[in-house]
Image: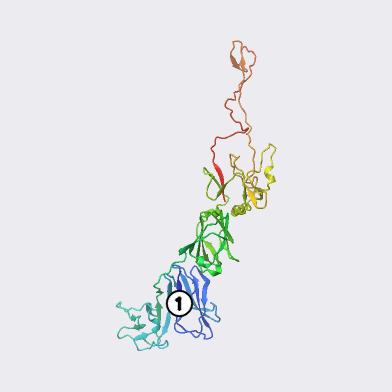
Amino acid sequence: MAQIQVSIEGSLINSSNNFVVALYDSTAPTVVLESQAPTKPYSNPFQVTFAYDATIGRTYIVKLWESADTTPSGTVRNSTSITPSANSTSVRFNDELIVDTSAGLTSGTDTYVNSSYIGWDLWFERKGEGTMFATTGTPEYTYDKTTGTITLPSGITFQPGEEFVTHFYPQIGTNIQTVSGGISSGVIISANTTFDNTYKNKAIFCQGSTSQLVCSLPALSTLLDYDYIYIYSNGGSHINLVLNTQGTDKINSSSQVTQIILGQCEVLKLFKANGVFNIDNDIAGVLGVGEFVYTMALVDANTLQCAGQLVNRADYPRLWAWVQTLDSSMLVTEAALATTDGNGNLINQAKFSSGTTSSNFRLPKLTNYELLKVVDGTARKAGSFEEEDLKPHSHVQTLFQAVNNGGLKPVGFSGTTGSLTNSVYSTANNTSTSGRNKLKNTGVYALIRI
């Protein structure tokens, strides 16, 4: 981050008014990031140093207001833009000068000395003409920044009433500061903890010893804009890391929330801006809760097998929260799991149950299903059961009858006939013992992301 300092020289048009200096982000030029009203009487020049931590490389606007009170209102007397590149950047508004009116600028002389210019790089302009150059291309003045002296070439003097403008280049500090967002150190957390602002810009490794670790983020009011909080849910034996905000603080996710829950090996990078925490990384684990995974591995990170087992709500809070967002038909009572249709099929096995007590819930049992079918959510809901069925169809069957010579002929064939023989159908290829039709298949595990 960087600090912006402004040097101002000028006088009020109305002595009863006040100077107010305000800082804006160039992307939101009407939103005041910080304003200051220096105390009268003003020195020339006077300095304003903003407390706001500016982002290096970002462009800001500084405006000088002449205000009837101490707010950034009234008339804008001057403005400038600045892009900080170091830990301390000073800018100075243009200095408007009139010969024989501005102190030290006298007609008939060829020198203007202003001690406040010492150390500043600048360019001097005859107002309305741009940078001062003679027709030969030789600069019309020299400048000594060690004494703040501007000298015109020999034979040229300032004329009565002439107007000039002094433009100042930003002064860049020499000490580069670590950009906010860089990790300065690390800390291991193994118990429920409320973070404060000393945790900013640190790698926070959360390693709980129980199924759930609960921590609170620092209060936003204790952080500066673009301070970072890095949280790593790595190690330990916790299943979920619950991260809560304090007070009315919010995290800007798909909506503004007060809680985010991480699984093992998941990361959350937050920074303060615009009055909320903002997420600065991919949170696929958080957004993927409830997703089905079909895999050859029975154990996969942050998943459970969908085998109809009971699990504790406290152990899997983000999965339980996700279940409650589903259509109400997807969450049934424990007793409803035994509901059958007219053929004895259990029709609710692919749904969640609210559990045997208020502390648990049951996962769907998908191990008895060979196919998943896409439904529209209206005529048929997710998790609903459909019995197997065989579409009506016909077979062409040719019946044969014996003839006198001992042979067979199709029924209806003219000639000598004998008695009709019984048709015999082989069942040698019918090896099903399940009582239902099957498709050729291979086995995979059905898991759900927690």
Secondary element under disc 1, as helix, strand or loop, is strand
Q: Which residue is mark 1?
A: 6
Residue located 58% across and 25% down the image = 428
Residue 361, image x, y percentages = 64, 49
Q: Position of residue 150 (x, y in %)?
A: 35, 83
Along the viewing direction, whichever of 323 and 155 lies nearer the viewer = 323
Residue 255 seen in the figure? no
Q: Position of residue 229 (x, y in %)?
A: 51, 63
Q: Nearer the viewer, residue 20 or 203?
A: 203
Of residue 426 and residue 367, the one placed in the foreground of this image is 367
Q: Residues within 10 Å of mark 1 (few under 14, many from 20)?
A: many
**Left or right, 355 with reference to 75:** right
Up-down relation of residue 288 to residue 216 (above or below): above
Above/below status of 174 relative to 257? below
Location of residue 393 (image quadrant): top right
Residue 110 in the image, given as x and y percentages of width and height: 34, 86
Question: Of the residues shown, which amino acid type is indicated by label 1?
Answer: Val
Residue at x 54% of width, y 85% of height? 16
Location of residue 343 (image quadrant): top right
Q: Residue at x 40, y 71 (%)?
A: 175
Determine whether, in the image, residue 360 is placed left or right of residue 133: right
The image quadrant of residue 306 is top right
Q: Is residue 162 left or right of residue 238?
A: left
Residue displayed at 44% across by 72% down: 82
Residue 71 visible at all: yes
